[in-house]
Image (tube, grey):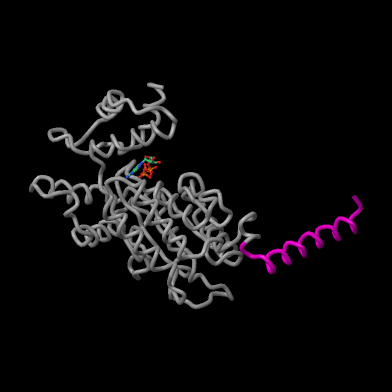
Amino acid sequence: VEPISLGLAIAGAAASALTGFISYPRLYCYFRECCLQRQDQRAAAALQENLDKKLFGQHLVNKVVVKAVKGFLNNTNAKKPLALSLHGWTGTGKNFVGRIVAESIYKRGLRSKYVHQFVATLHFPHAHSINIYKDQLQSWIRGNVSICPRSLFIFDEMDKMHAGLIDSIKPFLDYYELLDGVSYRQAIFIFLSNAGAEKITEVALDFWRNGRTREDIQLTDIQNALSVSVFNNKNSGFWHSTLIDRNLIDYFVPFLPLEYKHVKMCVRVEIESRGYAVDEDILTRIANEMTYFPREERIYSDKGCKTVDAKLDYYF
Ligand SMILES: Nc1ncnc2c1ncn2[C@@H]1O[C@H](COP(=O)(O)OP(=O)(O)OP(=O)(O)O)[C@@H](O)[C@H]1O
């Protein structure tokens, strides 16, 4: 194809896409992914429904995440982007919740071009390259928010992030109206880490040993201790971070360790999602195969629900 015709064809396609978007935005965005695709109220309702239905044993997470995200999406005059830091034992649902938030805002969820996931060990592996990573991270976020203000950024394995790296995004999380002509006030940042898991388990165990139910645990019983422990933990990615210092993290969200009954719920969901009838005997056997701690009481699954699907492969 000769260059002029190709140029004209591309310009024509772009013009017709623009006309389509302007004339029938809803229809256009039904077939092609758009920034701010779902109305924010619908996204908030979808989030609530999905967390209620799919997330087990995390009453604090459910409450805080729904309240924070719903409030933020419905606020037409947010003063800063939303920043949530999710903490807890392995396999308790942090990535799962990140995925549910992404899917409630964008139909394609983690595959959406407006949702960006960073994994510390994959994207920022070398300590000596930290200055390069800082520049890359800034320009990546700036570029993506310029394209779509309601961009979602998920940082996994924060506890493996080199100290100081995350501070490079501080300006984006702050209360600025515009930075170089870009507003970050509609963006959402979610940080995931295992840091603080011991503190959370300590509180949960205390309640259990005192004969109180898990659901009695309030956010106030954990949140302050959690933010202090994350700030002072050299392996948290937030060690002495200005993000915490300057109160730029809006919520520290504690994930409680999962109990035997929650593992059983995960096994049931996994069996059903594979299209098999639930065999109570297999379900119990798989839950019994998981290991539980502390050694004497054996209350919490040490891998949460994480290895459930691998164990199922053995039975089916
Ligand atoms: N609380 C939960 N409710 C329902 N399912 C769960 C829950 N926690 C974990 N799962 C199931 O286990 C899988 C693994 O959990 P997930 O990856 O979210 O753990 P994580 O907390 O991010 O662990 P890690 O800290 O190791 O990254 C999920 O995809 C989900 O299927």
Question: What residue span does the magenta drawing correspond to?
Answer: 1-26
Name the side, left or right, on which 290 lies relative to 297.
right
From the top left corner, tell me how far across and down residue 3 is, in percent: 89, 55
Ligand 1 lies in quarter = top left
Q: Is residue 192 magenta?
A: no
- Toward which corner of the image does residue 295 lie, by quadrant? top left
Name the side, left or right, on which 58 lies relative to 170.
left
- Toward which corner of the image does residue 228 lie, by quadrant? bottom left
**For residue 245, above or below residue 152:** below
Outermost residue, left side: 210
Outermost residue, top side: 315
From the top left corner, tell me how far across and down residue 122 is, in percent: 50, 44
From the top left corner, tell me how far across and down residue 305 is, in percent: 33, 37
Q: Main secondary structure of the magenta part?
A: helix
- At 56% from the left and 52% from the top, the residue drawn is 112
**For residue 104, above or below residue 181:** above
Work out whether residue 264 or residue 155 is closer to the camera in this orientation and state it.
Answer: 264
Quadrant housing the C terminus: top left
From the top left corner, tell me how far across and down residue 277 is, in percent: 38, 27
Work out whether residue 231 or residue 23 is closer to the camera in this orientation and state it.
Answer: 23
Name the side, left or right, on which 14 lies relative to 81.
right
Q: Is residue 25 magenta?
A: yes
**For residue 143, above or below residue 62:** below
Q: How many marks?
A: 0
- At 31% from the left and 54% from the top, the residue drawn is 61
